Image: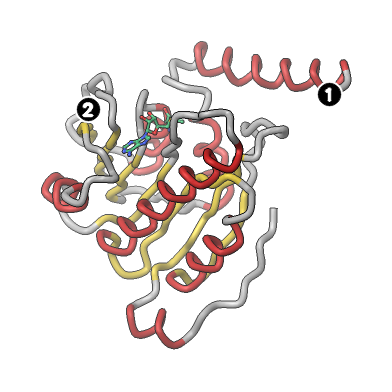
């Protein structure tokens, strides 16, 4: 990478890192979700949101701004998340690869979820094929959770890595949601292969079986 590109990249990383510190957000990732909510308004006042892979809690902070205290946010992670003082935010330690995970999540919710968001990432091994496969596996777990706990017409937002298995995963999400977009938020590093899928409007089982939708990826 040339010096100019490295300089731009470092400035950008530093910009969101500093901004998060100044604005009291727990991670620079907060801005990836906040920018997407601002543009697509897919988390609304009063919504019930489940955040998978939520530690240290930056996305929880972005989601709670959109739901306000009229809603409820459940943060789930392998690691403990420092508690929030607001009663409408709960956090639990839970491994999403465990078969009991969905039941556990449901036991904490006031009703079905309006939105499921997932920023789950595997521990990066540095071997690209391995990391991409692990990431797709986590994104597939998140999609299964979304299909089982979302209310009709609910929304889903998940991280993916671009690569061999990405296209098949994108097509799978399209089977279950009315509108599916590929997104690269400004706060996401341009040289990173991380992308996000925003899926709007969970279809009913009958619809999903009969009408695959036709939207193509757009960045
Ligand atoms: C990039 S971080 C999430 C950052 C978060 N969105 C934020 O804004 O603070 C990814 C998280 O996924 C979690 N994770 C990875 N595998 C998981 C699993 N099987 N179950 C639950 N969480 C998992 C990791 O522990 C890690 O905290």
Work out whether residue 132 or residue 36 is closer to the camera in this orientation and state it.
Answer: 132
- Looking at the rendered structure, the number of numbered marks drawn on it comes to 2
Residue at image location 22% in from the left, 32% down from the top: 91
Q: Where is residue 103 in the image (x, y as percent from the top left)?
A: 15, 52
The quadrant in which the N terminus is found is top right
Give the percent coordinates (x, y) of residue 71: 26, 45
Rendering quadrant holding ligand 1: top left
Question: As displayed, is residue 20 above or below residue 99?
Answer: above
> Is 46 above or below relative to 9?
below
The scheme the figure's colours follow is secondary structure
Q: Nearer the viewer, residue 139 or 149?
A: 139
Q: What residue occupies the far left of the structure in this picture?
A: 107
Q: Does residue 162 appear left or right of residue 77 in this picture?
A: right
Residue at the far bottom: name it. Answer: 210
Label 1 SS: loop
At x 23%, y 21%, the residue is: 83
Calculate the distance from the C-alpha at mark 2 to the C-alpha at mark 1.
44 Å
> Upstream in the sequence, badge 2 or badge 1?
1
Q: Is residue 37 above or below residue 6?
A: below
**Crowding near the residue tagged with mark 1, few <14, some 14–19, many ≥20 C-alpha atoms within 10 Å:** few
Contact (Cβ within 8 Å) of mark 2 with mark 1? no
For the point 51% across and 37% down, which residue is it?
34
SS assignment at label 2? loop
Q: Which mark is residue 86?
A: 2
Q: Residue 1 carries which label?
A: 1
């Amino acid at each position: 990478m040339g010096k100019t590109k490295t300089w731009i990249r470092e400035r950008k990383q530093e910009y969101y890192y500093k901004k998060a510190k100044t604005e009291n957000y727990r991670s620079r990732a907060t801005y990836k979700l906040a920018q997407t909510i601002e543009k697509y308004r897919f988390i609304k006042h009063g919504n019930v949101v489940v955040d998978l892979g939520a530690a240290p809690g930056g996305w929880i902070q972005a989601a709670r701004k959109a739901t306000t205290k009229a809603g409820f946010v459940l943060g789930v992670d392998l690691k403990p998340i420092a508690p929030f003082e607001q009663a409408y935010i709960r956090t639990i330690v839970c491994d999403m690869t465990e078969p009991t995970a969905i039941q556990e999540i449901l036991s904490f919710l006031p009703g079905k979820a309006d939105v499921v968001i997932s920023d789950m990432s595997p521990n990066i091994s540095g071997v690209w094929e391995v990391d991409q496969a692990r990431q797709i596996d986590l994104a597939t777990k998140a999609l299964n959770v979304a299909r089982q706990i979302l209310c009709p017409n609910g929304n889903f937002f998940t991280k993916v890595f671009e690569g061999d298995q990405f296209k098949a995963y994108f097509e799978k999400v399209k089977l279950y949601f009315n509108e599916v977009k590929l997104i690269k938020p400004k706060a996401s590093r341009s040289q990173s292969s991380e992308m996000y899928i925003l899926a709007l409007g969970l279809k009913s089982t009958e619809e999903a079986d009969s009408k695959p939708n036709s939207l193509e990826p757009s960045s």
